[in-house]
Image (cartoon, rainbow, N blue to C red):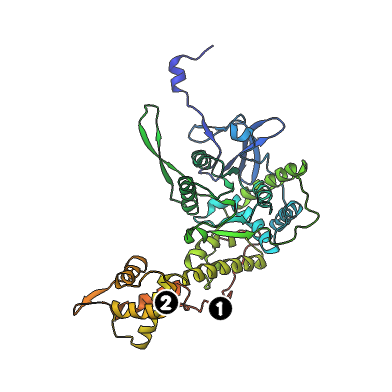
């Protein structure tokens, strides 16, 4: 018998769900059976796992898995596990991940260790509020795409896209599946597309900064929508982003700088997908067992790094029980910090700071006139410029770039002696001296390394 219209209206409608953490600490994850071509839920409750077709929660709402006919699932654009699978210890799981990567990709030893633990991080990334990104970079034919396929295939709900994709579906897919974006050819020719992609990377490493876009609703009215783009990202590209702040979010492997091992297969065998599925199944159980216990370990902050780099690296370090790998990551971060500060040191602002620092060192309590600063700048660096060095140009560098403010004294614009503290801090930022109030930045890795409980998780 067909239900009456009133019965139909009162019946609760199921909610299509990808993954959710319920108030009773039950974890629910979408899984896909490649043989039956069907989706279901893997449910982790009270230490036990089960596969359920639908799930009714305490509120009476029924959760329904995203159907297998979903285009992204059907065409394996988004990869899912099939079922939770026992993995042994965390170290055994990491060893399996390393062996899988080594079979198909030739990476440096340091980056291999970093990538193995970054994959673990993707499966518990929602325990943190900040994340780094992983990147392979190099010219065509160096193995970037192979690396992305292998690394991405065992990340948490990986979504594969490339520079040939339009940006709109990337926003929607990240927002819907909340997994790992695996993006190839992130170098865009057209600035508008690049700007849209950069929004995803700029907003995607810190929780709480959605990207706002305007869509059209059923009434053909423009409706602002917030897309959540926070999550891990594995990227392949040839060059670097122009934004130094964005560059600082990537842990990068330079491809094509070593002779590829002879045992690396030129073409991927069919069983590679089966190996990746088995690892995704093990990593699903790793997520179930470790998500609630994973915590940030602030003891892992390095005094040799900026606050920004420490902020994004500590989540990765917090899932690593291996101190050797921790030090590999810190060395890579130190090299990145050095390259950023070295590049800054070649800017005109750094040259102005060098003169200001010298002047304040000679006369700490004396204000410096813009005219004197301009003459000193021209004498030291004028031959490097095709343009004339004027008071206005130096004033613009001070005000717009360095945010040092001059005031008029006896008809002359001067930088007051009270700005000396700011100058010292800026000199440190531009890599010209050690932190005047902190440890010497030339000292590396002296901070104590925190410990774990042996399972990659930090105790609360």
- Quick one: 199 or 127, which is closer to the camera? 199
Q: Residue at x 58, y 60 (%)?
A: 251
Residue topped by disc 1: 443
- Quick one: 186 or 203, which is closer to the camera? 186
Left or right: where does residue 371 sit relative to residue 321? left
Mark 1 Cα shell of 10 Å, populated few (<14), some (14-19), many (≥20)? few
Q: Residue at x 52, y 43 (%)?
A: 174
Q: Residue at x 44, y 69 (%)?
A: 347
User: In the figure, residue 378 lies in which quadrant?
Assistant: bottom left
Tag 2 secondary structure: helix
Q: Quadrant of the N terminus?
A: top right
From the viewer's perspective, is residue 42 above or below residue 91?
A: above
Left or right: where does residue 108 sit relative to residue 7? right
Q: Measured from the top left, where is residue 103 in percent x and y? A: 76, 52
| Distance between the alpha carbons at the discs numbered 2 and 1 | 31 Å
Q: Measured from the top left, where is residue 32 in percent x and y? A: 65, 36
From the viewer's perspective, is residue 295 above or below residue 19?
A: below
Tag 1 secondary structure: loop
- Give the residue furthest to the top: 1
- Quick one: 149 or 345, which is closer to the camera? 345
From the viewer's perspective, is residue 294 above or below residue 356?
A: above
Mark 2 Cα shell of 10 Å, populated few (<14), some (14-19), many (≥20)? few
- Quick one: 266 or 309, which is closer to the camera? 266
Q: Measured from the top left, where is residue 395 in percent x and y? A: 31, 71
Q: Quadrant of the C terminus?
A: bottom right
Count of number-bearing discs: 2
Residue topped by disc 2: 381
- Give the residue furthest to the bottom: 362
- Give the residue furthest to the left: 410
């Amino acid at each position: 018998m067909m239900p009456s219209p009133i019965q139909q209206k009162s019946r609760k409608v199921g909610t299509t769900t990808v993954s959710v953490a319920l108030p009773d600490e039950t974890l629910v994850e979408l899984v896909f059976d490649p043989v039956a071509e069907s989706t279901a839920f893997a449910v982790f409750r009270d230490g036990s796992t089960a596969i359920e077709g639908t799930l009714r929660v305490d509120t009476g709402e029924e959760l329904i898995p995203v159907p297998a006919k979903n285009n992204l699932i059907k065409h394996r654009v988004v990869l899912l596990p099939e079922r939770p699978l026992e993995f042994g210890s965390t170290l055994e799981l990491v060893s399996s991940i390393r062996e899988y990567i080594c079979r198909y990709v030739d990476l440096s030893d340091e980056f291999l260790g970093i990538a193995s633990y970054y994959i673990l991080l993707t499966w518990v990334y929602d325990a943190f509020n900040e994340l780094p990104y992983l990147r392979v970079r190099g010219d065509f034919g160096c193995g970037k795409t192979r690396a992305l396929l292998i690394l991405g295939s065992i990340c948490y709900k990986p979504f594969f896209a490339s520079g040939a994709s339009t940006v709109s579906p990337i926003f929607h897919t990240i927002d819907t599946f909340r997994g790992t974006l695996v993006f190839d050819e992130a170098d865009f020719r057209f600035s508008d597309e690049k700007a849209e992609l950069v929004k995803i990377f700029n907003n995607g490493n810190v929780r709480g900064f959605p990207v706002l876009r305007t869509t059209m609703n059923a009434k053909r009215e423009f409706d602002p929508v917030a897309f959540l783009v926070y999550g891990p990202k594995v990227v392949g590209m040839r060059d670097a982003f122009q934004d130094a702040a964005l560059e600082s979010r990537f842990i990068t492997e330079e491809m094509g700088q070593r002779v590829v091992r002879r045992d690396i297969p030129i073409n991927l065998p069919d069983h590679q997908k089966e190996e990746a599925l088995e690892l995704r199944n093990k990593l699903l159980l790793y997520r179930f067992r470790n998500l609630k216990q994973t915590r940030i370990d602030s003891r892992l902050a390095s005094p040799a790094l900026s606050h920004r780099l420490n902020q994004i690296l500590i989540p990765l370090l917090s899932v690593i029980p291996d101190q050797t790998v921790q030090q590999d990551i810190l060395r890579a971060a130190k090299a990145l910090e050095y390259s950023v500060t070295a590049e800054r040191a070649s800017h005109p602002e750094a040259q102005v700071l060098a003169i200001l620092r010298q002047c304040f060192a000679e006369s700490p309590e004396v204000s410096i006139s813009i005219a004197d600063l301009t003459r000193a700048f021209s004498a030291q660096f004028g031959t490097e410029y095709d343009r004339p060095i004027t008071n206005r140009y130096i004033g613009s560098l001070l005000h717009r770039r360095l945010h040092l403010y001059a005031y008029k004294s006896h008809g002359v614009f001067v930088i007051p002696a009270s700005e000396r503290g700011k100058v010292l801090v800026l000199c440190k930022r531009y890599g010209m001296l050690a932190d005047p109030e902190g440890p010497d930045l030339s000292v590396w890795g002296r901070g104590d390394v925190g410990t774990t409980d042996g399972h990659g998780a930090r105790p609360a």
